[in-house]
């Protein structure tokens, strides 16, 4: 989690919380109840990425929206650690455990996934079988390729492999924009 936090702090601009307000919806799961919560308002950059240590020693009782949202939304038990992020006696972890693709109540939600399936932006399914698996509100194709993608998500390849994945995702996004006629061919 330290590496992830450092990367986020390096990449996000100082006004990230203002740019993200109402546009970025971070999905987290309450580890006790299993209920999903969507966070989309942050009063400061720190509330978006605030390290756990600052929250627990601040002396104030922060609102639930001030949890380190991006870190909590990335916390996979056992893989990222043993204890989910804690605040106000509640523990939070990756929103994918309760809702992998939350759909907002108004407007159109563009769904994005690294796994081939029924999402708006995702890799093309090239398998021989069209068996779908429904997991936490996400339909993915049951395939060897998706198992490989899961392995790469948990154990990222070296830089060259990451670059290839980034380019594949970019092509998937371009394909979506062209299908929706939001971009000329």
Image: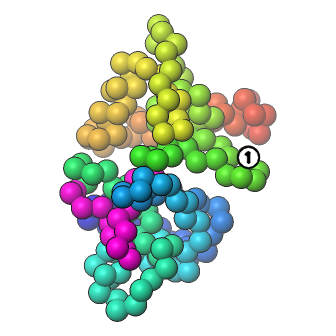
Q: Quadrant of the C terminus?
A: top right
Q: Is residue 113 visible?
A: no
Label 1 element class: loop
Q: Name the residue at 52% across, 13% down.
A: 130
Q: Name the residue at 77% across, 39% down.
A: 182
Eyeballing the image, is 91 above or below 153?
below
Residue 115 picture location, percent across and down: 46, 31
Residue 87 picture location, percent across and down: 37, 74
Is 66 placed left or right of 174 in the picture?
A: left
Residue 33 picture location, percent across and down: 41, 56
Residue 142 colored in magenta in the image: no
| Residue named by callout 1 | 108
Pointer 1 local density, CA inside 10 Å: few below 14, some 14–19, many at least 20: few
* Magenta segment boundaries in residue numbering: 81-95
Q: Is residue 99 visible?
A: yes
Coloring applied to the structure: rainbow
Q: Quadrant of the N terminus?
A: bottom left
Give residue 152's quadrant in the image. Answer: top left
Number of numbered labels in the structure image: 1
Residue 90 colored in magenta in the image: yes
Q: Name the residue at 73% across, 46% down.
A: 108
């Amino acid at each position: 989690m330290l590496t992830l936090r450092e990367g986020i702090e390096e990449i996000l601009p100082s006004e990230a919380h203002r740019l993200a307000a109402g546009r970025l919806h971070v999905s987290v799961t309450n580890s006790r109840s299993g209920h999903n919560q969507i966070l989309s308002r942050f009063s400061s950059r720190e509330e978006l990425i605030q390290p756990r240590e600052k929250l627990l020693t601040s002396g104030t009782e922060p609102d639930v929206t001030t949890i380190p949202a991006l870190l909590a939304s990335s916390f996979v038990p056992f893989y990222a650690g043993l204890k989910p992020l804690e605040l106000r006696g509640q523990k939070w972890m990756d929103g994918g455990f309760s809702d992998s693709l939350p759909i907002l109540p108004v407007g159109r939600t563009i769904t994005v996934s690294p796994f081939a399936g029924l999402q708006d932006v995702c890799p093309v399914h090239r398998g021989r079988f069209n068996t779908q698996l429904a997991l936490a509100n996400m339909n993915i194709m049951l395939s060897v390729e998706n198992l490989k993608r899961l392995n790469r998500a948990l154990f990222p390849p070296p830089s060259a492999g990451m670059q290839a994945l980034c380019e594949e995702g970019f092509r998937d996004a371009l394909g979506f924009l062209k299908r929706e006629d939001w971009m000329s061919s």
